[in-house]
Amino acid sequence: MSTLPPLQTSTDRRHRRWAVVIGVVSFVTLIGAAGFRSVPGVLMQPLHEEFGWSHGTIGAAVSVNLVLFGLMSPFAAALMDRFGVRRVVSIALTLVAAGTGLTIFMREPWQLMALWGAVVGIGTGSMSMTFVATMSSRWYVRRRGLVSGILTAGNATGQLVFLPLIAALAGHHGWRTASLVVAAVSLLTVPVVLLLLRDHPHDLGLHAYGATADDPGPARARGGGSSAGRALAALAGAARTRTFWLLAGGFAICGATTNGLIGTHFVPAAHDHGMPATTAAGLLAVVGIFDVLGTIASGWLTDRFDPRLLLGLYYAGRGVALVLLPHLLAPGVEPSMWAFILVYGLDWVATVPPTVAICRGRFGLAGPIVFGWVFASHQLGAAAASWGAGFVRDVFSSYDLAWYGGAALCAVGAGLSLAIAPTRRLREEAERERVPA
């Protein structure tokens, strides 16, 4: 590693060039991770029709995927600190390719749970939102909130790119072809990561983009100790704080009302009302378009306003949209459904930039790992909602109770967010008690 230059303001041409390269490659990686994870919702109906598996059974496999997607996050952040981002992401992409490719041979529900649930869950979980927190914290000081918003938008773009394609492939060529396409795209992303991604700006003799003497950006994480030990130590420290539990509770509700409810069950729910699966998948893709705009805007707002107030607003808006959804589903796409798509799209993962900002401000260098644990709660909530909504559909032959239950949870999420201490007090708490990095 070359010697670092004197620290003034790291915004010269070389810094800008690498900041752009890292941002683009990170964005592409997140596109893949989101697209791979969202596929099971589109394949639910084809699997149900071919194998006769109930919505609850398939939803349980998706729940396994969501749980591991979340639980891997803090450990992935620690692994990235110890072994490097490139290695972890490359292995994760290989796991996704193996898990999706082998599904073409499955015949039993346990095989769906093992492959789409466990293998793909571990792979995509290693490229989840902790990747956003890690890269935005290491590489950027200037406009961190905006960068985290742009990278988080990769999640929406993955949905935008993959869902209509996978739905069309499954409809015209069968779900096995769709699975093989996911496996191929995953493998093709590996060389891009190996060639262009870098673990830390110090590897190139650079400071973080926009670094100053007052905020030089994070130093390299300490390499000592096991990755699991560091992840658990960060959890132990964070769990002693009120902020962590408020964030985790709110983010569990966030996961339940996005990936768990809408991401997994919107397509089959729309199908129940006579809407073609390709049309419903297209609507989710439009959610992805607006999500890009909403998440980038949320990052911009996070740089300027109290993030806890933003979280409260986002949850409240999402709850109102869910209350209205049962009255909007129909065989065709009415203007009122477009209003739902707009609101839900702008709100989908707008919660990530303010949550990352709170974790970074409260927990310092341990912020990305702590955010991994907060994100784990997001996926636990998503898993519970994925299974629960499928159960509601099997018992009542309708998703209505699931939508209303999600709306009630959003009201709780808004209250939890507003109960977080203001930013200035969080910084004072962080100075008094540092969570282990």
Image: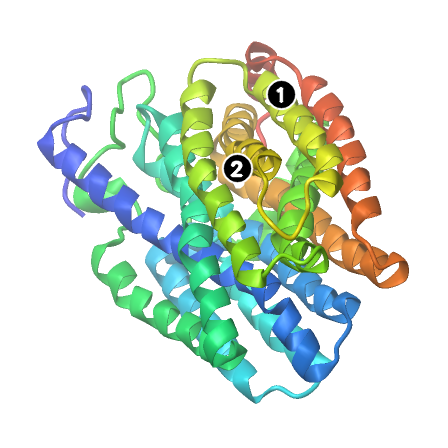
Q: Counting residues from the N terminus, which is met first, the one under dot 2 or under dot 1?
A: 1
Residue corresponding to mark 1? 313
Q: In this view, does 22 lie to the left or right of 257?
A: left
* Residue 274 location, quadrant: bottom right
x, y percentage for residue 317?
64, 26
Is residue 239 at least partly visible in the picture?
no
Mark 1 nearby-residue class (10 Å; few <14, some 14–19, many ≥20): some
Q: Is residue 320 left or right of residue 164?
A: right
Q: Which residue shows up at 71% across the image and 55% down it?
A: 273
Is residue 292 at least partly visible in the picture?
yes
Q: In this view, does 145 lie to the left or right of 19?
A: right
Residue type, mark 2 in image: Gly
| Residue 345 - label | 2
Which residue ends up furthest to the left in the rendered image? Answer: 13
x, y percentage for residue 45?
65, 69
Q: Is residue 45 above or below residue 347?
A: below
